[in-house]
Image (tube, rainbow, N blue to C red):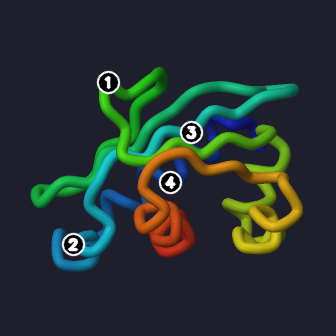
């Protein structure tokens, strides 16, 4: 699965969530993915829903940096986000509270 396909799947999952389900995850999540199939994407969660865009967000609340391969494993439930963080596979800049909501958002 490519990085683009993972984000398209994420976009489809988020479209199926109600504003109530997204209420606790509001903010802008920037993903900077390196390595093979690396890319930049951001997810903006607002009271009216969530959007997924390629590129760089103007003012992200949290920035997640990792390899594209590790992100794919995370998105598919094969990599635990806390383990990835503790082992240095995932780095976080910005609002740690938003980062902690990442697993709920992407699964």
Task: Write down the quadrant of residue 98 in the picture.
Answer: bottom left
Q: Earlier in the sequence, mark 3 or mark 2?
A: 2
Q: Where does label 4 land, which residue?
A: 10
On screen, residue 24 above or below 66: below
Q: Who's the residue at 47% across and 26% down the image? A: 54
CB under 8 Å between callouts 1 and 3? no
Between label 2 and label 4, give the one nearer the viewer: 2
Q: Earlier in the sequence, mark 1 or mark 3?
A: 3
Q: Who's the residue at 27% across and 74% down the image? A: 24
Q: Earlier in the sequence, mark 1 or mark 2?
A: 2
Q: Secondary structure at mark 4?
A: helix
Distance from the alpha carbon under mark 1 to that under mark 2: 21 Å
Q: Where does label 1 land, which residue?
A: 58
CB under 8 Å between callouts 4 and 3? no
Q: Where does label 3 land, which residue?
A: 31
Task: Write down the quadrant of residue 12 in the picture.
Answer: bottom left
Q: Secondary structure at mark 1?
A: loop
**Which quadrant is the N terminus positioned in?**
top right
- Residue 55 x %, y %: 47, 21
Distance from the alpha carbon under mark 4 to that under mark 3: 13 Å
Q: Secondary structure at mark 2?
A: helix
On screen, residue 21 above or below 76: below
Q: Earlier in the sequence, mark 4 or mark 3?
A: 4
- How many numbered marks appear? 4
CB under 8 Å between callouts 2 and 4? no
- Residue 74 x %, y %: 73, 62
Between label 1 and label 4, give the one nearer the viewer: 1
Numbered mark located on residue 23 in the image: 2
Q: Does residue 22 appear to the left or right of 78 in the view shown?
A: left
In the image, farthest residue toward the left = 48
Distance from the alpha carbon under mark 2 to that under mark 4: 17 Å
């Amino acid at each position: 699965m490519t990085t683009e396909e993972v984000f398209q799947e994420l976009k489809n999952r988020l479209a199926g969530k109600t504003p109530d389900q997204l209420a606790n995850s509001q903010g802008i999540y920037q993903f900077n993915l390196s390595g093979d199939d690396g890319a930049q994407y951001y997810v903006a969660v607002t009271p009216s829903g969530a959007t997924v865009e390629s590129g760089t967000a103007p003012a992200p609340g949290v920035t997640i940096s990792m390899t594209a391969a590790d992100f794919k494993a995370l998105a598919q439930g094969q990599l635990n986000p806390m383990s990835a963080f503790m082992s240095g596979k995932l780095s976080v800049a910005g609002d740690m509270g938003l980062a902690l909501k990442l697993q709920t958002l992407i699964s």
